[in-house]
Amino acid sequence: MANSSFSDVLTLDREAPEYKSKDFSSDQDVRWCPGCGDYTILKQVQNAMPSLGIPKERIAFVSGIGCSSRFPYYMNTFGMHSIHGRAPAIASGLKITRPELNVWIITGDGDSLSIGGNHFIHLLRRNLDVNVLLFNNEIYGLTKGQYSPTTQQGFVSKSTPMGSVDHPFNPLALALGADATFIARTMDRDPKHMNQMVLRSNEHKGTSLLEIYQNCVVFNDGIFEAYTDKASRPKEAIYVEHGKPLIFGDNNSKGIRLNGLTPEIVDLDTDYSADDLWIHDEKDLTKALILTRFFDRPGEHDHFPRVFGVLYAIDRPCYEDGVNAQVATAKAKSKKTLQDLLTGDETWLIK
């Protein structure tokens, strides 16, 4: 952490000063390609930090490997650039031993869903109180354009010159399969919405997963243009809010209703009104599963908009609370010291 004194570190219960966004900018030169979506993500995270009301010495960013994982260098907080795919393991250890810290995991689609896939799913099911920002550009950017676990089938890359035959991961659907308690999606070219989602992720008690569509201007430029372009966004993207109907389209002329559990796109200018539509409920797992699968529905007649916002959010006990409760109970029951354990009956000799 830049510009932090030892006395600051010792005073973790102090009130947060009235920070500004620039207070969370480090003195490091930001080294991403010009035009990279990571710049916007960095800026919106820095903009959100003052609203948390937390002293900087109680905030930690942990990253793995990849373009996104340079992030901790650019935040004037504590942080660690760790190893490929293992940021969830390192962040888990940090949160368990220092539960008072506000911990953020910065990762990419390759880092978290390929080499780090096992750590990713177990973090979600354990539900530590940490925040995951998953930068998804559907490509390996740092290693120069190989296909990733989220790359679309048929995509021609340096490692798939005849087109990828892999079926891609759907990160939010995968997260629900791992019993995640909070999933949301935003995009780099909608900074206002991203800022809201960062703050909302932080409010969640448990593991929050925020998938961020991030443009790789060099190796996968424009892959999310349908959702980011002002002309196509109304038809291709839908923003969900708890308790509100699912409406989208030019002049909000389209809506989505449920016929049983089958979603249908309807025209609000003719036969239907907002009262007929699906009302978003963040706590409904079945409907959240349907929302995550909108873009997996093939065929032009089934072309649903991509969903942005909080798709699912429920409460469940956090892993670190359970672990530390067990530690406290064990300490209360036992009067033994480490020396007692080393010289006690539960030892044996190897001959």
Image (spheres, rainbow, N blue to C red):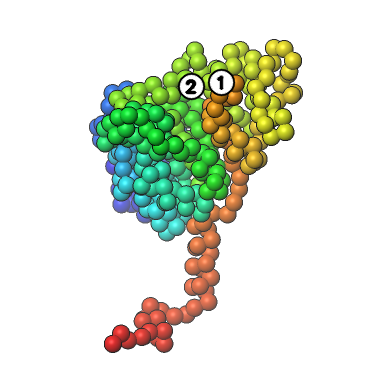
Pointer 1 or 2: first along the chain: 2
Image disc number at residue 195: none
Q: Residue 71 location, x and y as percent?
A: 33, 38
Residue 49 can be seen in this image: no
Q: Which residue is mark 2?
A: 227
In percent of the image, x 66 and y 29: which residue is there?
263
Q: Nearer the viewer, residue 199 or 345?
A: 345
Q: Is residue 192 left or right of residue 221?
A: right
Identify the amino acid type marked 2: Tyr
Disc 1 and disc 2 in contact, CB within 8 angstroms: no
Residue 103 place in picture, x, y as percent: 43, 47
Q: Amino acid at mark 1?
A: Glu
Dot 1 corresponds to which residue?
300
Secondary structure beneath dot 1 equals helix
Q: Residue at x 32, y 86 (%)?
A: 349
- Residue 234 placed where, x, y %? 55, 17
Work out how far the residue at label 1 is from the one at label 2, CA to CA, in angstroms.
17 Å
